[in-house]
Image: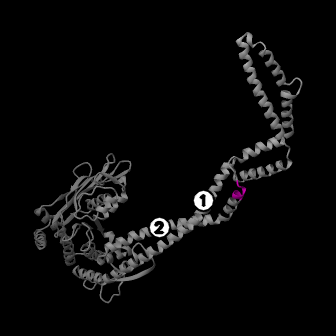
Amino acid sequence: MLQKLSIRNYALIDSVELEPDKGLNIITGETGAGKSIMLGALSLILGQRAETRYFFNQDKKCIIEGQFLLSNTQLQPLFEENDLDFHKESILRREISTDGKSRAFVNDTPVTLTVMKQIGEGLIDIHSQHATLEVNDPEFQLSVVDTLAGHQSLLSDYRKQFKLYKQQQRQLDVLQAKIIEARNKQDYEQFLFNELENANLQADEQEKLETELQMLNNAESIKRSLLTAYHLLSEQETAVLPILKEVVNQLQSVEQFNPAYSILNDRLRSALIELKDIAGETSGLEENIVFNPSRIEEINDRLDLIYTLQQKHRVNSIDELIVIQRQLSDNLASLLSGDEEIERLVKAQETRYAELEQMASKLSENRSQSIMSTENQVGKILQQVGMPNAKIKLEQHQSAELNKDGKDLINLLFSANSGQAPAPVGKIASGGELSRLMLAIKSIMAKHTSLPTLIFDEIDTGISGETALRVGKVIGELEKNMQVICITHLPQIAAKGDAHYFVYKNEETERTTTGIRKLNSTERVNVIAELLSGKKPGASAMENARELLDYKN
C-alpha cells in the first residue's frame, strides 16, 4: 500500500506530498491541472525511464520518493535475491540529476532500474485509458486466466524450471558447437599428434645431437690437435713432462739448504701430476675420436626432423614441441569427454523437458477449468456496469513447443450486444466498452491477487449517468481487497471515495505550479457539484452532490 508520495521538481510540480487513504482515493481537478503528471512522477519510482526536459527547475535535480507498507512477504524473496533489506515500511526513491543521470534506491540501497521495476510491479498496477489496449495483449489475456486459476505457485515453479532448461540448452548448444568445430579439426590434430608422438622427442636431445654432429664433422682436426697436444706433453725430446721431471730433480737436490726450495718443489710435483693426468686424458680423448659417416647421416636425419617440426609449429625448441604435443593430446581427450558430457546433458534435458511437459499439462488443465468461471464472473460485472448483453469468450489453444508460460495460447473474444458474435476486442469495442471491460477484468483479478494498490487514470471515458454510478460502485467494491486510487472527471465515481484529493494550478507566482490538497466534507460537496454543472454550481447541483455523497455512505 502506498502510504506517502513525495514529488520535487517534476514538470509543473515544485514540491507536493500525497498521503493516500488505505481505501478508495479519488483525485479530481481541472483539465491540464496536472493529475496525470503525478502518475508520471509515480511511474519513475516504478522503474520507468526519465527525461530531464520534464524538470520544473533545470538547475535542481528531481526527486520522487514513495513510502510503501508491505503487508505481506511475497516480495521478500525478491528483496533477498537482490541483497536488499526487507522492511514492512519500505521506501523507493528516484533521483534524476540535471545532466540526465538517474539513480534508484530501495531503502537507501542503490539498485538498477530493472530491480526497481520488478519491485514496483509487485506494489502498484496503473491502469489508464490507454492501457485498455492491454486487453488485446495475448500475455495479458493469459494472465487473467492464470489469476483465476489460482496456480501461481505451480506457474512460478514452472517458469523457474523452464528458465533453467533454457540456460542448460544454451550451454548444450555452445558445447555442441565446440565439439563440431573440434571434430572438424580432429583428423588434422590427430595427424599432428601422431607425428609428434612418433618423433619421440626428448627434452635435451637437440643440444646433444648438435654438439655430437659438430664433433663428428670436425673429427680429423680434433684428433690431430689432441695428438699434437699429447706429443708436446710426453713424447718429444723437448716434451713438457720430461723437462719438468728434470726440474723436480734439480730442486730436490737443493731442498736441504732452504725450506723455500722444498715448498717450491712440492708445487712443481703437483703440477707434474696434473700434467700427467692431462696427457693421459688427451691421449684417451684422441683415441675415442672416430670419423663415422653413417652416424653423421643418422644425426642429420634426426635434426632435420626436429627442425621441420619446429618450423611447422613455429617454435624454436623441443620443449615447445612437447608442450604442443600435450595440448593436442588434451584436445583429443576432451573431444572424447565432450561427447560423454553432451550425452549426459542431452539425457538431463530430456528428463527436464518431460517434467516441464507434465507441469505444462497441469497448467493447461487448471486453465481449462478456470475459463468458464472467468467468463461468467466478467459477464456479471459487465452487467453491473450497464452492459447486460455483453460477454467474453476465452479460446484456449496450444503451441507446438513449450514457452515460459507452458503451451497455452489464450484468445479473448468480446461481444457487447445480443446477437453479435464474439470477435477480437480491438475490432469491435468502443472506448467506453473497453474501459468497462478492463474494469470488470481488473476487479475480478483484484480478488485473487495480493497486489496492494490499483490506480485508475480516467478509465471512465465514454460513460455517464447511470452507467457511471454502476462503474463507481464496482470501483468502490475494490477497496475491500486493496488500496485504490482513481483519477476521474465523473461525479458519480468521485462521490464513492473514502478520501478526495483536488489537483489545482497555482498561477499567482511568476511560474505556474501544480499542487494537491485533501478536501474536507464541505469542499468535497462543492467540487462534486462543479463536476455536475460546471463553475459556480447552483442549489440543485449542490443538493445532487450531497445526495451522491449520501448514497455512497
Q: Nearer the viewer, residue 500 or 326?
A: 326
Left or right: 55 with respect to 540? right
Tell me the CA gap for discs 2 and 1: 25 Å
Q: Give the residues in magenta.
A: 195-200
Q: Nearer the viewer, residue 196 or 39?
A: 196
Element under disc 1 = helix
Which residue is outermost to the right? 237
| Residue 325 found in image quarter | bottom right
- What residue sits 35% from the left and 70% below the top? 156
- What residue sits 77% from the left and 16% below the top? 252
Q: Nearer the viewer, residue 277 or 176?
A: 277
The residue singled out by tag 1 in the image is 330
| Residue 87 found in image quarter | bottom left
Residue 85's place in the image compared with 180, above or below, is above
x and y percent of residue 416 in the render? 30, 83
Which residue is outermost to the top? 257
Does residue 120 show up? Answer: yes
- What residue sits 81% from the left and 37% below the top? 284
